[in-house]
Image (cartoon, rainbow, N blue to C red):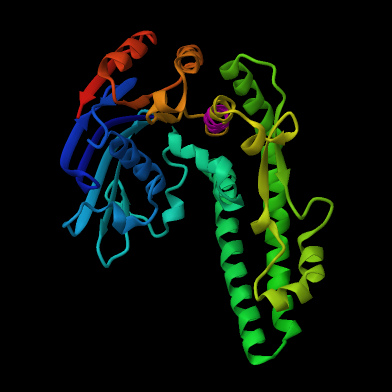
Amino acid sequence: MQLTSLDLINYKSFQTADFVLDEKINCFVGNNGVGKTNVLDAIYHLAFAKSYFNPVTVQNIRHDEDFFVISGTFLKNEQQEKVVVSAKRGHSRVIKRNGKIYDKISEHIGLIPLVIISPADRDLIIEGSETRRKFLDGVISLSNSGYLTKLITYNKLVQQRNALLKYFYANRKHDSAALAVYNEQLSGLGDYIHATRLEFMEQFTPIFKKYYERISQSNELVHISYDSQLTGSTAMEQFEASLQKDMQLQYTSAGVHKDDLGFLLKEHPIKKYGSQGQQKSFLTALKLAQFEFIKQQSGTVPILLLDDIFDKLDEQRVSQLIGMVNDEQFGQLFISDTHPERTEQVVKEIHQSYKIFKL
């Protein structure tokens, strides 16, 4: 997978910008606030139809403008793919592939395999379970479109069931037959989602552990646990057991939408017991495992975005990362940094072609 050109109009800090890109390494350098991360986010936007840093579409439109357009030309399996993402205030975003508008945005997910490593990844450790579920679901969905379709349907049904529970509470009514319909639909989807997540974690965790050991240069015991209410149970059993509780709370308190990942260092939460360096190594290993898993599943080498990598890792860990990039036959790289000289010194060690864009 390769991005050959990128054009921006009214995207975040850019009024207009265009880049003709190197097939291997592209570095965006400059002072803080000049838009380095915005360029990487535009590339992410082309892959996932949303910003990595601000998923509210209209907030990515440049101040005092009414719209933005991001256009990128990719080469995938020697075939050209032109992707355009645009948004206008008061309208829905539009994603086009080779001039054709998608009927559903979910149809686009997986076309452009891509992984970003950013200081913002720390949210995976410090934020709530929803952030980690999104990571889990995002990795699975890139190579399993059926999973994404079922997940979207499941989440919509949970919202509808919640609305029904609120209606019952407000009107002092209860229709067990109506709830049973939702429970039946949700249970089948929930059991599928749980089984798919469980299978994914069995494949993903060993890859993650391998990368953590290489980045940290240590044999520290790390693990990712998959924490689900459906462990040893079925979705239907969970819905039936929590019915009275749900009636009082007015929302669906049990199900795979409550799943979480436990990030563990020596069997303890890394959020509480891990040093800053250990947490950074954990997150970087997590993202590199994501990269390798997608590569294995899709048969396509993903694009890798390294946002402000020197802020995320110390020089020793950067050296370990760069060594892996050189050894593991990574594909196209995009790097942002505040120091042009430091960036060029690092990329020269990879012995690949590169371009440096000074913003």
| Residue 144 visible within the image | no
Looking at this view, is 26 or 120 the one in front?
Answer: 120
Q: Above or below — where is 250 with respect to 28?
A: below
What residue span does the magenta drawing correspond to? 283-296
Residue at horizontal 67 percent and vertical 39 percent from the top: 200
Q: Position of residue 174 (x, y in %)?
A: 72, 87
- Relative depth, front residue between 46 and 52: 52
The x, y position of residue 186, in whole percent, is: 68, 66
Quadrant holding the N terminus: top left
- The correct choice, above or below, for 173 with respect to 356 in the image is below
Residue 201 in the image: state x and y as whole percent: 68, 38
Left or right of 235 in this view: 1: left
Picture quarter containing residue 39? top left
Q: Residue at x 59, y 57 (%)?
A: 151
Depth order, front residue of 157/265: 265
Q: From the top left corner, tell me how far across and down residue 245 is, in percent.
A: 75, 73
Q: Nearer the viewer, residue 268 or 259?
A: 268
